[in-house]
Image (cartoon, rainbow, N blue to C red):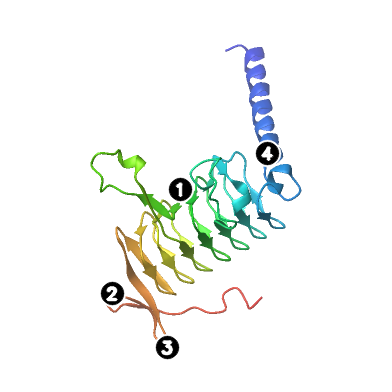
């Protein structure tokens, strides 16, 4: 390759990456932008990275303060842009929560995410599934019952986890990567697997106890009280 060609290629490469960084910044949804104003509420210091995948029926989505949503996210309410039955607060994300890249949250009735909840990448959450009982109709045309979902404050939802309709996750719960969760999960528990089961829980005055009786001590004050 000739020196002039190499220099041109490097210049083009720099230009492409500079343009992409500019698009990243310019395309963010932050307070004060027209896109943020389309949400039911959009808190101070919050940001949805560019580019999103799907943001459907934003007026029913409420984003707290200090929330970060990664790129290629899907935040969706209802069955389409013309859905006449949208709840006012179908999807609520609490303050200081972080939702990783490629998260997909589809709400029809109610999905509530507490404060300081962390999602890994490619997490899927839904409050409605499909039916299958009618053998004469395609499965995709058999809409399932709407069952509200809640995720307690301080919880961690690992990479690729699936949270199914009707799930209620307590506070400071760890959902292991790749787990599929349905039902109720107590506060201060670690769940893993398909279906997800409790593999460790906090026992007062003992520590974090696993199913075999192994104990991990409680650690306090690592980051101070503030």
**Which residue is at 55% across, 46% downward?**
84
Q: Is residue 208 above or below residue 32?
A: below
- Camera-near label (3 vs 1) is 1
Q: Which residue is mark 4?
A: 27
Residue extending furthest toward the right: 32
Q: Position of residue 186 (x, y in %)?
A: 40, 74
Sequence-earlier tag: 2 or 3? 3
Alpha carbon separation for disc pair 4 and 3:
49 Å
**Which residue is at 42% across, 60% downward?**
147
Q: Is residue 193 above or below residue 154?
A: above
- Are the residues flagged by discs 1 and 4 in contact, CB closer than 8 Å? no
**Which residue is at 42% across, 79% downward?**
217
Sequence-earlier tag: 1 or 4? 4
- Camera-near label (2 vs 4) is 4
Alpha carbon separation for disc pair 3 and 1:
36 Å
Q: Which residue is mark 3?
A: 205
Q: Residues within 10 Å of mark 1 (few under 14, many from 20)?
A: many
- Compared across the picture, whether 112 is left or right of 66 comes to left
Q: Which residue is mark 2?
A: 211
């Amino acid at each position: 390759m000739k020196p002039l060609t190499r220099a041109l290629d490097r210049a083009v490469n720099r230009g492409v990456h500079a343009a992409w960084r500019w698009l990243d910044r310019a395309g963010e949804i932050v307070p004060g932008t027209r896109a943020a104003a389309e949400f039911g509420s959009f808190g101070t210091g919050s940001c949805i990275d560019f580019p999103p995948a799907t943001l459907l029926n934003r007026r029913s989505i409420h984003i707290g303060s200090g929330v970060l949503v990664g790129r290629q996210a899907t935040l969706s309410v209802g069955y389409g842009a013309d859905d006449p039955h949208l709840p006012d607060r179908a999807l609520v994300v609490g303050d200081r929560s972080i939702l990783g890249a490629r998260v997909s949250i589809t709400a029809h009735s109610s999905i509530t995410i507490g404060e300081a909840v962390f999602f890994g990448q490619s997490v899927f959450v839904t409050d409605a599934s499909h039916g299958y009982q009618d053998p004469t109709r395609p499965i995709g045309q058999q809409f399932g019952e709407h069952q509200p979902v809640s995720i307690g404050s301080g919880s961690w939802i690992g990479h690729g986890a699936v949270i199914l309709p009707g799930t209620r996750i307590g506070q400071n719960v760890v959902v292991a990567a790749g787990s599929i969760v349905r039902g109720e999960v107590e506060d201060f528990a670690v769940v893993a697997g398909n279906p997800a089961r409790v593999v460790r829980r906090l026992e007062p005055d003992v520590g974090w106890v696993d199913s075999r009786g192994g104990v991990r001590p409680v650690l306090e004050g690592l980051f101070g009280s503030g």
